[in-house]
Image (cartoon, rainbow, N blue to C red):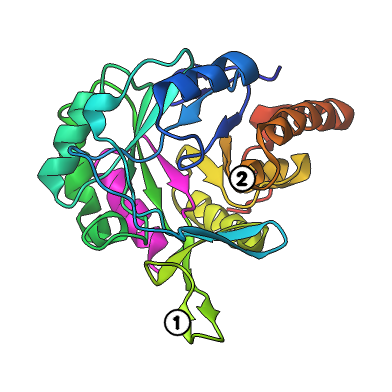
């Protein structure tokens, strides 16, 4: 194992399960922790009160290893968060600054890291609609939690500006990137396939976008970064680290191929690092010229 520290949190290796992948059912999460022993799981986004997910269909395949989803941040509310037997990075969201702050406060005891979701494109008034308030949100969340605070941002044109504001507000790190907003239409009915209309594109097709965004943000600010976006191989994971990610989140691979593929990826990553004879601390940002 190649252990690492992220914002002071010890991890067995730099590969974690990204948000939105493991259902927010404590019994199921506990089984995942026991069987697969991930170094950490980032939870689905919790809000202060329960939110109903959008109606089906909420997930469609749009290409090889590429999906589009619009779950809409459906969750049972932060009061249902329970210990599950492995490290939790707790994703929090809300439709107001106060709601996000209260949710983060309630997540504090069970979270190793608080991840603020101001980038989901899949529910009005939440996620991306809160991004312009990111500096104030982070500042207030830092006032109610003792845990490191990360901010999850999307692949937008103004992502560097928002990253700067998050860090100015006191964020301990950033999670890059969330999904890219898209749409797929049924040509027979001439209507969107997803019930919400639009959805977040994830998987292989956004990997080069993740590489570019992480590279640019790391070059500008050198923050601690959880890199996410179309990681399907050990080389994909190493690529995100070379442009600045300290830890890599795996998501769509698990949707596409199951949790066994996550286990295989971890083994392949350790083998690749060993074969290359590299020091992971020296790898981070090695492809970024400053």
Mark 1 and 2 residues: CB-CB less than 8 Å, in contact?
A: no
- Residue at image location 72% in from the left, 29% down from the top: 266
Q: Secondary structure at mark 1?
A: strand
Q: How many marks?
A: 2
Q: Position of residue 183 (x, y in %)?
A: 48, 74
Check residue 191 in the rendering and tell me which mark sits there, or answer none: 1
Q: Nearer the viewer, residue 222 or 110?
A: 110
Q: Position of residue 246 (x, y in %)?
A: 56, 35
- Residue at image location 19% in from the left, 41% down from the top: 100
Q: Secondary structure at mark 2?
A: helix
Quadrant location of the N terminus? top right
- Residue at image location 43% in from the left, 16% down from the top: 84
Task: List the residue tagged with mark 2.
Answer: 255
What is the quadrant of residue 253 in the picture? top right
- Residue at image location 25% in from the left, 20% down from the top: 146
Q: Is residue 125 magenta?
A: no
What is the quadrant of residue 67 in the picture? bottom right
Q: Nearer the viewer, residue 52 or 241?
A: 52
Q: Residues within 10 Å of mark 2 (few under 14, many from 20)?
A: some
Q: Position of residue 51 (x, y in %)?
A: 25, 46
Seen in the image, is 213 located left or right of residue 283? left
Q: Which residues are magenta?
A: 156-178
Q: Position of residue 59 (x, y in %)?
A: 51, 57
Q: Is residue 157 magenta?
A: yes
**Circle 1 or circle 2, nearest the eye:** 1
Q: Looking at the image, is 94 positioned above or below residue 101?
A: below
Seen in the image, is 274 located left or right of residue 12? right
Q: Looking at the image, is 43 positioned above or below residue 255?
A: above
Q: Residues within 10 Å of mark 1 (few under 14, many from 20)?
A: few
Q: Which residue is farthest front? A: 189
> Alpha-carbon distance for marks 1 and 2?
25 Å
């Amino acid at each position: 194992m190649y252990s690492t520290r992220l914002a002071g949190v010890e991890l067995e290796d730099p590969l974690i399960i990204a948000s939105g992948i493991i259902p927010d059912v404590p019994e199921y999460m506990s089984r995942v922790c026991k069987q697969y022993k991930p170094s950490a799981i980032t939870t689905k986004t919790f809000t202060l009160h329960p939110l109903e997910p959008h109606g089906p269909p909420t997930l469609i395949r749009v290409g090889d290893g590429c999906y589009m989803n619009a779950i809409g941040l459906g969750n049972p509310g932060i009061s249902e968060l329970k210990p599950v037997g492995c490290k939790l990075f707790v994703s929090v969201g809300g439709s107001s600054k106060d709601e996000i702050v209260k949710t983060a406060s309630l997540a504090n005891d069970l979270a190793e890291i608080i991840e603020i979701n101001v980038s989901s494109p899949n529910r009005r008034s939440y996620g991306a609609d809160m991004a312009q308030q990111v500096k104030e949100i982070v500042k207030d969340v830092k006032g109610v939690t003792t845990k490191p605070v990360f901010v999850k941002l999307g692949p937008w044109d103004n992502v560097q500006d928002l990253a700067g504001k998050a860090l100015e507000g006191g964020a301990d790190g950033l999670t890059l990137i969330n999904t890219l907003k898209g749409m797929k239409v049924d040509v027979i009915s001439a209507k969107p396939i997803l019930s919400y209309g639009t959805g977040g594109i994830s998987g292989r097709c956004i990997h080069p976008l993740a590489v570019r965004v992480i590279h640019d943000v790391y070059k500008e600010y050198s923050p601690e970064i959880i890199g996410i976006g179309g990681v399907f191989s050990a080389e994909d994971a190493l690529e995100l680290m070379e442009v600045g990610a300290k830890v890599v989140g795996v998501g769509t691979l698990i949707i596409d191929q199951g949790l066994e593929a996550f286990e295989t990826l971890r083994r392949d990553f350790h083998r690749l690092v060993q074969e290359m004879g590299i020091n992971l601390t020296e790898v981070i940002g090695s492809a970024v010229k400053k």
